[in-house]
Image: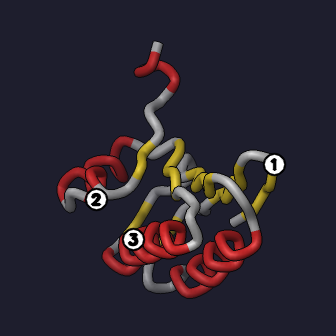
Amino acid sequence: MRVRGNPGAQVVRIGARLDAGTSAGVRERLHKALDSGEGDLILDLSKLEMIDATGLGVLVGAHRRALSVERRLVLRGVPPRIMRILAVTRLNRVLHVEAPAAAVA
């Protein structure tokens, strides 16, 4: 996971897995990024291959924390498989998922 900042937002790249084994480290980094930055916190999920219930909990927790510090959590580059999981769990209605550029055009 890499955090990159810019004036309007921070971008955090998530690795291939967001599960029970990786969630503690990811959660800590997301909280630090939310507490120290400004603007949107964009999670780049383009490399994400696997997410479990713990990983979904990390996303929900980061969303809540973002709201508490008056920021917005944005999911970018969500792979179709992960998007289906978000849809089945209805988290796509709670979390802000950025539309792909091809869908916008």
Percent across and percent down for residue 55 are 42, 74
Residue 42 vs residue 49: left or right?
right
Q: Dot 3 corresponds to which residue?
A: 60
Residue 4 vs residue 31: left or right?
right
- Which structural element holds mark 2? helix
Of the residues under marks 1 and 2, which one precedes in the sequence? 1
- In depth, the one of 23 and 31 nearer the eye is 31
19, above or below 100, in the image? below
Quarter placement of the N terminus: bottom right
Using the numbered discs, state the Cα–Cα distance from disc 1 to disc 2 in whole angstroms: 27 Å
Of the residues under marks 3 and 2, which one precedes in the sequence? 3
Q: Badge 1, how many Cα within 10 Å: few under 14, some, many 20+?
A: few
Q: Residue at x 62, y 78 (%)?
A: 31
In the drawing, what numbered circle is on residue 29? none
In the drawing, what numbered circle is on residue 6? 1
Asked if the residue under mark 2 is in contact with the one under mark 3, i.e. CB atoms within 8 Å, the reply is yes
53, above or below 1, in the image? below
- Mark 1, mark 2: which one is toward the viewer? 1
- Which structural element holds mark 3? helix
- Which structural element holds mark 1? loop
Which residue type does callout 2 highlight?
A: Leu
Using the numbered discs, state the Cα–Cα distance from disc 3 to disc 1 in whole angstroms: 24 Å
- In depth, the one of 99 and 65 nearer the eye is 65
Of the residues under marks 3 and 1, which one precedes in the sequence? 1
- In depth, the one of 78 and 99 nearer the eye is 99
Q: Badge 3, how many Cα within 10 Å: few under 14, some, many 20+?
A: some
Which residue type does callout 3 highlight?
A: Val
Q: Dot 2 corresponds to which residue?
A: 91
Asked if the residue under mark 2 is in contact with the one under mark 1, i.e. CB atoms within 8 Å, the reply is no
- Image quadrant assignment for residue 10: bottom right
Using the numbered discs, state the Cα–Cα distance from disc 3 to disc 2 in whole angstroms: 8 Å
